[in-house]
C-alpha cells in the first residue's frame, strides 16, 4: 500500500509519524501548510493507493487524475468537504470517524457560553483601549439560565455533561430521540420552535449538510428569545452571518461567539467589528489531544475504509 499524507500536522507528533512509517513503510509526508489546489493535489498523490487528508477536496477532476487512488482517509472531524457520489464513481473508499474531537469542541463551547454571557470580549476591549476609569457595566451568570443545544450527537452530549455543575436547565433538539441519555442527564427534549423560544443561551452542534446550511436565517434569528446568547462551534454557513449582524447591533441577540464562518479564513468578516461578537479562527479541535486522536484515526482508517453512501450520515 503506497500512502501519501496531505496534512502537515504529523510533524508535530514525531512518535505518531514513526508509528505510521512502521505500518506503511515509505509513506510520503508533507510539511507545507499551504492548501493544495486541484493540480497540486493530483501531482502530489499521483501513483499512490491511499491518501490521509485534512480538508482537501476531491473533485471530479482530482479523482479522474488519480486512477491508482483507492482510499481517502480523513483526519478531520467533519466530512462536509467530501462528495460521496464522486468517490463512488471512481471506486474510492473513505474513512471518517465521528466525534473524534468531541471533548475539545465541547469544552470550547461551554467556555464561549461563559465568555459571551459575561461580556468578557467587550470588557477586555475597554482595558486594551485604556478606558477603564470606573464601573464598566454588567454581564450575567450562566447559573440559573436555560441552555438550548441544537444537535445532541457526540459533541452535544459532551456539552450536556460539562454543563451539569453549572445549575442550568438544559433543552435539546435533535432529529434522533436520545431518550435514555436525556433521562440520565435531566435534559428536556423539545422541538426547534420551543428551543428557539426558550433558550437564554443557544449552542449549535449540527453537521453541515443540505438540511442545515442556512438554517439560522433571518426568520429563525427573529424567533430566538430576545437577549439570547448564540454560540456556534459547529460549522460555518449554518447561521446567516449577514442577518446576524443587525440583530447583534440592535440587541435582539445580546451576544454571539463563533469559532466557524461561512468563508474561512474569515479575515475581514464584518461580524468581527461588532462589539458583542467574539470570533476565533476555527480552533475547536486545536488541542494536542484532539489532533493526536484525529491523526491516529486517519492513519488507522486506511485499513477500515468503507464505501460512502450519499444521503446517509454524515452526508444527509
Image: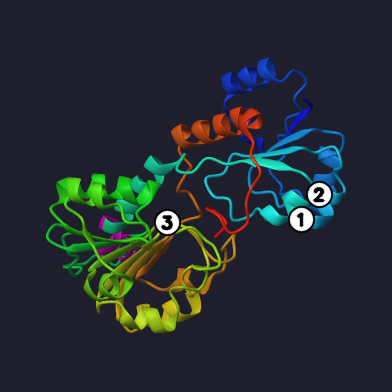
Magenta stretch, main secondary structure, is helix
Residue for badge 2: 63
Question: In terms of sequence position, does the residue under pointer 1 or pointer 3 come before the other?
Answer: 1
The numbered dot on residue 59 is: 1
State the image quarter where residue 252 is shown.
bottom left
**Residue 119 quadrant:** bottom left
Q: Which residues fall within the magenta stretch?
A: 114-125
Q: Are marks 2 and 1 in contact (CB under 8 Å)?
A: yes
Q: Identify the secondary structure beneath mark 1.
A: loop
* Number of other residues with Cα within 10 Å of mark 3, as a class: few under 14, some 14 to 19, many 20 or more: many
240 shown above or below 160: below
90 or 241: nearer the viewer: 90
Residue 268 in picture, x, y percent from top left: 56, 68
Residue 233's label in the rendered image is 3
Q: Residue at x 20, y 65 (%)?
A: 139
Q: Are marks 3 and 2 in contact (CB under 8 Å)?
A: no
Is residue 210 left or right of 63 when viewed as pictured? left
**Crowdedness near tag 2: few (<14), some (14–19) or many (≥20) residues, C-alpha within 10 Å:** many
- Magenta residue check for 314: no
Point out the tag, 3 or 2, that comes first from the N-terminus. 2
Q: Which SS class for mark 2?
A: helix
Residue 213 to residue 221: above or below = above
Q: Nearer the viewer, mark 1 or mark 3?
A: 1
The residue closer to the viewer here, 1 or 164, is 1
Percent x, y of residue 309: 62, 51
Q: Is disc 1 in contact with disc 3, using a CB cutoff of under 8 Å?
A: no
Is 174 placed above or below 297 here? below
How far apart, in angstroms, are the residues tagged by discs 3 and 2?
31 Å
Q: Determine the CA span between mark 2 and mark 1.
A: 6 Å
Seen in the picture, residue 148 relative to 289 is either above or below; the reply is: below
Q: Going 48% across and 49% down the picture, which residue do you hit?
A: 283
Quarter of the image where the N terminus is located: top right
Amino acid at each position: 500500500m503506497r500512502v501519501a499524507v496531505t496534512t502537515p500536522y504529523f510533524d508535530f507528533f514525531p512518535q505518531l509519524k514513526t508509528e505510521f512509517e512502521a505500518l506503511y513503510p515509505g509513506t510520503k509526508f508533507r510539511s507545507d501548510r499551504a492548501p493544495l489546489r486541484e493540480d497540486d493535489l493530483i501531482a502530489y498523490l499521483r501513483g499512490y493507493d491511499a491518501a490521509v487528508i485534512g480538508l482537501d477536496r476531491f473533485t471530479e477532476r482530482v479523482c479522474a487524475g488519480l486512477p491508482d487512488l483507492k482510499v481517502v482517509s480523513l483526519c478531520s472531524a467533519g466530512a462536509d468537504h467530501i462528495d460521496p457520489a464522486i468517490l463512488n464513481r471512481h471506486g474510492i473508499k473513505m474513512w471518517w470517524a465521528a466525534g473524534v474531537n468531541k471533548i475539545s469542541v465541547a469544552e470550547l463551547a461551554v467556555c464561549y457560553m461563559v465568555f459571551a454571557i459575561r461580556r468578557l470580549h467587550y470588557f477586555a476591549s475597554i482595558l486594551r483601549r485604556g478606558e477603564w476609569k470606573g464601573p464598566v457595566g454588567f454581564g450575567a451568570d450562566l447559573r440559573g439560565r436555560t441552555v438550548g443545544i441544537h444537535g445532541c450527537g457526540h459533541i452535544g452530549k459532551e456539552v450536556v455533561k460539562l454543563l451539569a455543575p453549572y445549575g442550568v436547565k438544559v433543552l435539546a433538539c435533535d432529529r434522533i430521540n436520545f431518550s435514555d441519555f436525556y433521562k440520565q442527564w435531566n435534559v428536556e427534549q423539545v422541538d426547534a420552535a420551543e428551543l428557539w423560544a426558550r433558550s437564554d443561551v443557544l449552542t449549535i452542534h449540527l453537521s453541515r449538510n443540505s438540511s442545515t446550511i442556512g438554517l439560522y436565517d433571518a426568520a429563525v434569528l427573529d424567533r430566538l428569545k430576545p437577549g439570547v446568547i448564540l454560540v456556534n462551534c459547529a460549522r460555518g454557513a449554518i447561521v446567516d452571518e449577514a442577518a446576524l449582524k443587525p440583530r447583534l447591533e440592535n440587541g435582539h441577540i445580546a451576544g454571539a461567539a463563533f469559532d466557524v464562518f461561512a468563508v474561512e479564513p474569515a479575515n475581514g468578516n464584518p461580524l468581527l467589528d461588532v462589539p458583542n461578537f467574539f470570533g476565533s479562527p476555527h480552533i475547536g479541535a486545536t488541542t494536542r489531544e484532539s489532533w493526536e486522536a484525529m491523526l491516529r484515526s486517519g492513519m488507522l482508517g486506511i485499513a477500515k475504509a468503507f464505501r460512502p453512501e450519499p444521503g446517509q450520515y454524515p452526508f444527509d
